[in-house]
Amino acid sequence: MTILEVQDLKTYYSTLMGDVKAVDDVRLRMDKGEALGLVGESGCGKTTLALAIMRLLPWNGRIAGGKIMLNDIDIVGLDDKTFDKEYRWKKMSYVFQGAMNALNPVFKVGAQIAEAITIHEDVENPEAMERARELFRLVGIDPERTTSFPHELSGGMKQRAMIAMALACNPDFIIADEPTTALDVIVQAQTLEVMRELQKKLGLTTMIITHDLSVVAQTCSTCAIMYAGNLVEYADINTIFSEPAHPYTKALIGAFPSIKEDRRELVSIAGVPPNLLHPPTGCRFNPRCPNRMDICSKEKPDYLELEDGHNAACHLLTKEG
Amino acid sequence: MNGEIELKVENLKKWFPVRRGIVSTLLSRKTDYVRAVDDISFEVRKGEIFGLAGESGCGKTTAGKTVLRLLEPTSGKIYFEGRDITALNKLEMKELRRRMQIVYQDPYQSLNPRMTVFDIIAEPIQVHKMSDSLAETEDIVHKALEEVELIPGEDFVYRFPHELSGGQRQRVAVARTLVLQPSFIVADEPISMLDVSIRAGILKVMLKTRLAQDVTYIFITHDLAYARHICHRGAIMYSGKIVEMTSMDHLVKHPLHPYTIALMKAVPVPDPEYEKARAVIGGEVPTPINPPPGCRFHPRCSKASDICRKEEPELTEVGNEHFVACHHAL
Ligand SMILES: Nc1ncnc2c1ncn2[C@@H]1O[C@H](COP(=O)(O)OP(=O)(O)O)[C@@H](O)[C@H]1O
Ligand SMILES: Nc1ncnc2c1ncn2[C@@H]1O[C@H](COP(=O)(O)OP(=O)(O)O)[C@@H](O)[C@H]1O
Ligand SMILES: [Mg+2]
Ligand SMILES: [Mg+2]
């Protein structure tokens, strides 16, 4: 069952120098229970896509085209009031990048979660506090810690508390933006275990945004690769790693070291991602692509379905012969 | 690499006094210390890349800076090419500074924002009087830019750091280091703030001089996958101590210390076919103020027994150049 469908979404930021085309014609579908990893270099538009879906774009950001269907309703057209009341927190919520540092230092963490619950649902405080304790248990923190202040929690616990908060009103769908980027390896493993548990226990649909392919390999069932505002490939996680179709996907995998493989020379991707004020014409990856052809700087490649559930946008895939 | 010892560190300690509130100062006169580096010993061979790895707060940066005497050691000895540099005065140290360099983690903070790329790279050349004329300085700067693959150099010399990408900035930082022709470089997480896609390129320009000029590196990282691909030998630190040290390949394949084993299991593998990373230990790295008696890792260790709570294990050779500090590793 489709829970989220993003159709040809354009999200631009207006600046003095013109529009930053942070998300441009993105097409994406997520099924219920899917765990999607959204991967790409910094600045490619991952957070912008999440903010557009959550309707949390900053003042200079706007949806310049396309639709975002949540359970078959286009949420782009909804008025703010309905969206606030019925969607954000309840149907979907967002653990934003760096969230663990955003807890209010003067309030106990349990009270902050309870507050989120009482704002969005018609429940009394004691019940909300009990829910907060349950949520702590769910993310693997001792419920007694709900009476702690943020500074009394370690970084890993704060991150889990933020995940607990996102779950406060039982959403079906959550987006976690770089949930483990600032964490050390053992704490990262603890957090990833919690994410996997939640997916299993609650049947939660999750989008995990990260620049780290290994995090995706560990927690996701599908993977979308984003480059310079475009989705360039989407497939189930095994296909992405074993049969990547797009040269960018291949290059990313080649750049990523694994502790399980013998010492080898790591290969970086030449050049830098483009400025999204003036992205290259044709395929946006063409200036850095090892397989570039004439057509690549002229025509934008279609985002094709190669097989059921495997999409990619690259001229190599349609080349004659 | 010819097995010659370039750097030898003996019983190095760096303790930072903890600032305390007025009340506790009145109540007791004892000062607490953060034992950021607490009695570590190791050797680095000429031309080698030696890894210092561990989670944040374990003392890697403090160890790296103290080894260069950018921080004064609390106690211990540091021998560079056989000479005890802890005994050198400022003037003698200045001469050595050129040859012992550091590349920092954050290219956004390590470059002066008001200087052009040219001035940033020319400054150390002038400080160390490595050029006789402006023309010679210009020549060295251009060669350095070429070396770090900022090409053509003319496009970069007049730019300011904010006009560069993170990767380009780190290349400038590397160029600034390499113009001094150092023989020893501490690289403190030089790629951890950069995108994965460009990290290998920075590593390449940083490390290619190693072979040509026999440069020795301490490569500090929290990322064991990178450590495996870059370092020859390495040490794992926990709470100011070295807990295990051997060749990087051996360390990854046959870890003995329970902490190293836990670290290895926690490293996620970028391949969905692999077993998932697991946290086999709970908790997080403690700040090393008043560390527990005995082994520092014992509160989190499943193997901990009485002796671990009482006696601090020494770093002991348990096999061919494989050192472990654990009462139960044998
Ligand atoms: N408020 C803003 N105004 C203008 N440009 C922005 C704004 N926020 C982000 N951008 C730009 O949009 C692009 C995408 O950013 P972002 O979605 O944050 O990428 P990611 O999360 O993948 O790192 C970048 O080029 C970024 O500089
Ligand atoms: N200047 C300082 N004063 C007090 N404590 C410090 C100072 N520098 C580092 N520390 C502490 O020493 C410990 C080791 O820090 P650091 O060497 O930066 O670790 P790493 O580089 O492994 O993350 C940490 O607990 C840190 O808070
Ligand atoms: Mg982001
Ligand atoms: Mg450090």
Image: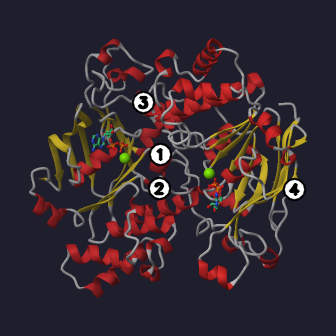
Q: Quadrant of residue A46?
A: top left
The quadrant of the picture occupied by the N terminus of chain A is bottom left
Residue at the location (56% across, 21% down)?
B149
**How many angstroms separate mark 4 from mark 2 (CA)?**
35 Å
Q: Quadrant of residue B294?
A: bottom right
Tag 4 residue = B318
Q: Nearer the viewer, mark 4 or mark 2?
A: 2
Secondary structure at badge 3 equals helix
Secondary structure at badge 1 equals loop
* Dot 1 crowding, Cα within 10 Å, few <14, some 14–19, many 20+: many
**How many angstroms separate mark 1 from mark 3 (CA)?**
26 Å
* Dot 3 crowding, Cα within 10 Å, few <14, some 14–19, many 20+: few
Q: Nearer the viewer, residue B63 or A135?
A: B63
Residue at the location (76% across, 32% down)?
B99
* Dot 2 crowding, Cα within 10 Å, few <14, some 14–19, many 20+: many
Task: Identify the disc placed on residue A180.
Answer: 2
Query: Is residue B154 visible to us here?
Result: yes
Labels 4 and 2 within one chain: no
Tag 3 residue = B163
Q: Nearer the viewer, residue A11 or A313?
A: A11
Which chain is disc 4 placed on?
Answer: B
Judge from the rendering whether residue B278 lies leftward or rightward of residue B50; answer left or right. Answer: left
Q: Amino acid at mark 1?
A: Asp
Q: Nearer the viewer, mark 3 or mark 2?
A: 3
**How many angstroms separate mark 3 from mark 2 (CA)?**
29 Å
Tag 1 residue = A212
